[in-house]
Image: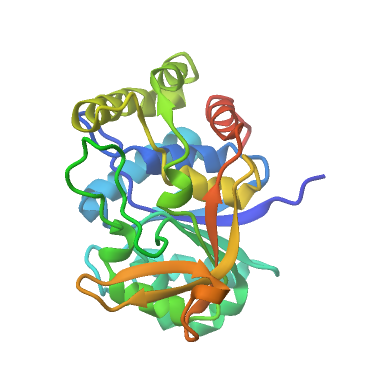
Amino acid sequence: MITRVPVWIDTDPTVLPGGYEVDDGFAIALAFRSPELRVVGVSSIFGNGDIDCCHASAEAIVAAFGPIDMPVHRGAATPGDLHATPAAQALIDAARRTVRPGLTILALGPLTNIAAALTLAPDIAEQIASIIWVAGRLPGQEFRASMQQTEAFADLNFEQDVAAAHIVLASAVPIALTSWTVCSKVHLGRAEIARLGTADAACSVLHGPARDWLDLWRNQFGLDYFMPFDTLAVGHASASGAVSGFAGRAWIDPSSPPVLIAAPDHTAPADARPVWFGTDAGDDFVETLMTRMTTPTSQ
């Protein structure tokens, strides 16, 4: 029998018609439909939109893919909020309830809720097996999807609350980064989005918004695909899709704006902290993603 990994999802989805980012929604769906994972809780955070938008979107996705009546715990609305929001308190409680090796946190947005939990209850660091965060870059790396893209993507999950990143990086919790380096190698196009339209009712929540998001990528970047960034964090947590990388170190370069950088041990500054950094995904990642997302499971 598979021992399922207990995971907490901290997320900032904006799964809406009209060309809004959908990868958080794909990641939530994948987590609920990955047999290796047991989703014990979900919290919302500002990021891709304001907290009202992200919370409502998270509720809709969890209602579609998760167990009946699973709540979404409302998190911080602004950077630097280290108060005991419902999200921070629920995360503390979940970490304390989880037996060793502990809770895996899928951090799909800014780290504000997680920083608050670690600040309010430092003891939970021993109960967290890993934080898998979609953030960070290699030295000198820019995030550009195509030559048609005039302005590089920001590392938003880091840049929207740098102070929270400092708190979490200073903790003893193991951290894995699944950032642009690996996410940019996974592409979803028209054929994959069409599969959502012929799947179960839950997938209909994602189908229209994903089609609009694909149209935006085609119009803005000249690409016939988009990158489902946050799904790589789920793939790493579930050890599916052959997500690979290196054990290195990460640090915050205090430039303007600050930059979160990861590199192999031998090239990192002496005071950088250990991390795992994703670099590649297996050839079967997309098929695994789509098969799992479109296959209902009993909750």
Percent coordinates x, y for residue 276 in the rendering: 56, 64
Residue 158 sits above or below residue 245 on the image: below
What scheme was used to colour the molecule?
rainbow
On the rendered image, what quadrant is the C terminus found in? top right
On the rendered image, what quadrant is the N terminus found in? top right
| Rendered residue at 28%/48% (across/down) | 54
| Rendered residue at 60%/31% (across/down) | 288
Give the image quarter of residue 204: top left
Between 206 and 266, the one nearer to me in the picture: 266
Residue 192 sits above or below residue 7 on the image: above
| Rendered residue at 29%/37% (across/down) | 146
| Rendered residue at 44%/17% (across/down) | 191
- Direction right: furthest residue: 1
How many marks the image carries: the answer is 0
Q: Left or right: where does residue 277 sit relative to residue 58?
A: right
- Direction left: furthest residue: 150
Percent coordinates x, y for residue 164 in the rendering: 34, 74
Percent coordinates x, y for residue 219 in the rendering: 20, 26
Percent coordinates x, y for residue 98 in the rendering: 64, 66
Residue 105 sits above or below residue 80 on the image: above
Q: Is residue 82 visible?
A: no
Between 293 and 222, the one nearer to me in the picture: 222
Residue 2 sits above or below residue 298 on the image: below
Between 139 and 183, the one nearer to me in the picture: 139
Q: Is residue 23 visible?
A: yes
- Direction top: furthest residue: 198
